[in-house]
Image: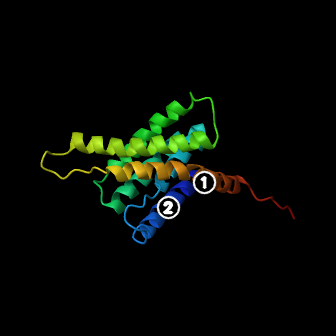
């Protein structure tokens, strides 16, 4: 549970940082989806008994993304959860690992989240409601997310090692 709480905290801080940096950057500069990478890390690296914790982290980060980006509530939460379930079941069949797999998973997850959210809006909204179509920005954002995936995974691996170390007990 501590690891899931740490991932949730890091994901929320990543969302807040990207919301802070976005107005400073020139228009059209893609930002990586750090919350998606944190959720992906949680679904792939947390232990088997904590599957519910990793999905809770994914849904929570998706809900925070919805609230801070003014999307319909639950849109990214549902998309994050569905993508994490699909990628977790698919990644066990892949035989290679390393930075290439991390980049590929970040790219696929980002494209699936944005494509899935567009599909969910198209299916669930009324015909007269405004639509959410990210367009070219989603592709550039997916590329930025994929490129930053190894960095985020490495940082989270180091943080997870630090959290899992227990202090030595002293007996006086």
**Left or right for 92, reference 140:** right
Q: Which of the marked residues, 1 or 2, is nearer the chain's N terminus?
A: 2
Determine whether 22 is above or below 125 in the image. below
| Image coords of residue 139 (percent x, y) | 40, 48
**Residue shown at 65% from the left, 51% from the top:** 157
Residue positioned most to the right: 172
Query: Considering depth in this image, is 164 or 88 the residue closer to the camera?
Result: 88
| Image coords of residue 153 (percent x, y) | 60, 50
**Left or right for 2, reference 109:** right
**Residue shown at 40% from the left, 52% from the top:** 62
Residue positioned most to the bottom: 24
* Residue 60 visible at all: no
Label 2: which secondary element? helix
Residue positioned most to the left: 128
Quarter holding the C terminus is bottom right
Label 1: which secondary element? helix
Query: Considering depth in this image, is 169 or 45 the residue closer to the camera?
Result: 45
Label placed on residue 151: 1
Residue position for label 2: 14
**Residue shown at 36% from the left, 62% from the top:** 68
Label placed on residue 25: none
**Left or right for 10, reference 76:** right
| Image coords of residue 50 (percent x, y) | 56, 42
Of the two numbered discs 1 and 2 in the rendering, the one whose residue sits closer to the viewer: 1
* Residue 161 visible at all: yes
Residues marked 1 and 2 touching at CB (< 8 Å): no
Q: Quadrant of residue 92?
A: top right
Query: Considering depth in this image, is 21 or 93 the residue closer to the camera?
Result: 21
Determine whether 49 is above or below 137 in the image. above
**Residue shown at 43% from the left, 68% from the top:** 25
């Amino acid at each position: 549970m501590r690891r899931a709480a740490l991932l949730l905290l890091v994901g929320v801080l990543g969302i807040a940082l990207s919301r802070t940096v976005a107005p400073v950057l020139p228009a059209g500069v893609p930002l990586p989806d750090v919350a998606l990478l944190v959720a992906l890390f949680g679904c792939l690296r947390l232990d088997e008994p904590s599957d519910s914790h990793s999905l809770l982290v994914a849904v929570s980060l998706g809900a925070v993304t919805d609230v801070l980006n003014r999307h319909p509530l639950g849109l990214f939460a549902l998309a994050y959860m569905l993508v994490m379930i699909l990628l977790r079941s698919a990644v066990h069949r892949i035989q290679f690992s390393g930075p290439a797999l991390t980049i590929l998973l970040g790219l696929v997850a980002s494209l699936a989240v944005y494509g899935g959210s567009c599909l969910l809006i198209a299916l669930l909204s009324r015909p007269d409601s405004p639509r959410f179509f990210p367009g070219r920005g989603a592709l550039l954002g997916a590329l930025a997310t994929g490129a930053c995936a190894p960095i985020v995974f490495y940082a989270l691996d180091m943080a997870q090692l630090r959290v899992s170390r227990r202090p030595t007990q002293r007996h006086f």
